[in-house]
Amino acid sequence: MLFIQINFLFNTFIFSGYKLQKITHMEPSIGITPDHLTSVSKALNTILADEFVLYVKTRGAHWNIEGPDFHSMHLYFESQYHELEEIIDEVAERIRMLGHYATAKLHDYAALTHLTEEISEANNSRGFLKTLLNDHETIIIHLRENINDFNDKLNDAGTADFITGLMEKHEKIAWMLRAHLK
Ligand SMILES: [Fe+2]
């Protein structure tokens, strides 16, 4: 019995080429260099910061909106922050797929974001709609700037495709916000 066990271990660990080593790193081996994975992840953390700040501002609009159209706008902003909640999760998990950590500190978001925390000049629908439209358009511009770089310079077609889809979601929300302001 002992012989069988020793023989099994011998065959398994020697002849199979198995090396007893402690795996300390599980870097993604997906055809993108570590430097490029780092660059894409850094850019994604900035996108995450933008999305998080916009999420908080959209919740603020939901809470603080006043005026005769309160009820419809209160619900409208709620549907938007739910959508942003999903986007935030997708961006953070994309960073993890690339082997990096997603920033989860408010002061990092404030430092990284392209947006300001200003809400609007008035707590009415026009003020909030204009502020949020401006923020969505700012995000669209920055996403668009990154798409070609991710694809061509950093060899990450997956993330280029991911942020293209993200940009389209923001374009749809921006269209709806714009339509309210006509
Ligand atoms: Fe609510």
Image (spheres, rainbow, N blue to C red):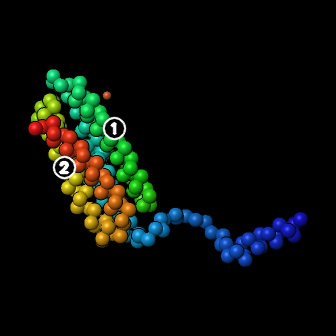
- The structure residue drawn at horizontal position 27% and vertical position 29%, both measured from the top left corner, is 75
Left or right relative to 130: residue 154: right
Q: Which residue is tagged 2?
A: 137
Point out the tag, 1 or 2, that comes first from the N-terminus.
1
Q: Amino acid at mark 1?
A: His
Q: Residues within 10 Å of mark 1 (few under 14, many from 20)?
A: some
Mark 1 → mark 2, Cα distance in angstroms: 19 Å
| Quarter of the image where the N terminus is located | bottom right
Of residues 1 and 82, the one drawn nearer to the viewer in this rendering: 82
Snapshot quadrant of residue 61: top left
Residue 72, quarter of picture: top left
Tell me: residue 74, above or below residue 89: above
Residue 172 in view of the camera? yes
Q: Characterize the local packing of mark 2: few (<14), some (14-19) or many (20 or more) Cα atoms within 10 angstroms.
A: some
Closer to us: 42 or 168? 168
Residue at image point 23% right, 49% down: 171
Residue at image location 15% in from the left, 22% down from the top: 68
* Tag 1–tag 2 contact (CB < 8 Å): no
Q: Could you say where residue 109 lies in the image, as x and y percent from the top left?
A: 29, 48
Q: Look at the picture and state if 122 lies above or below 51.
A: above
Residue at disc 2, CB closer than 8 Å to ligand 1: no
Q: Taking the image as four quarters, which one is ligand 1 found in? A: top left
Residue at x-position 22% and y-position 56%: 142
On the image, the x and y values in percent for residue 3 come to 87, 70
Image mark for residue 82: 1
Image x and y of residue 153, in percent: 30, 71
Image position, residue 2 (x, y; %): 87, 66
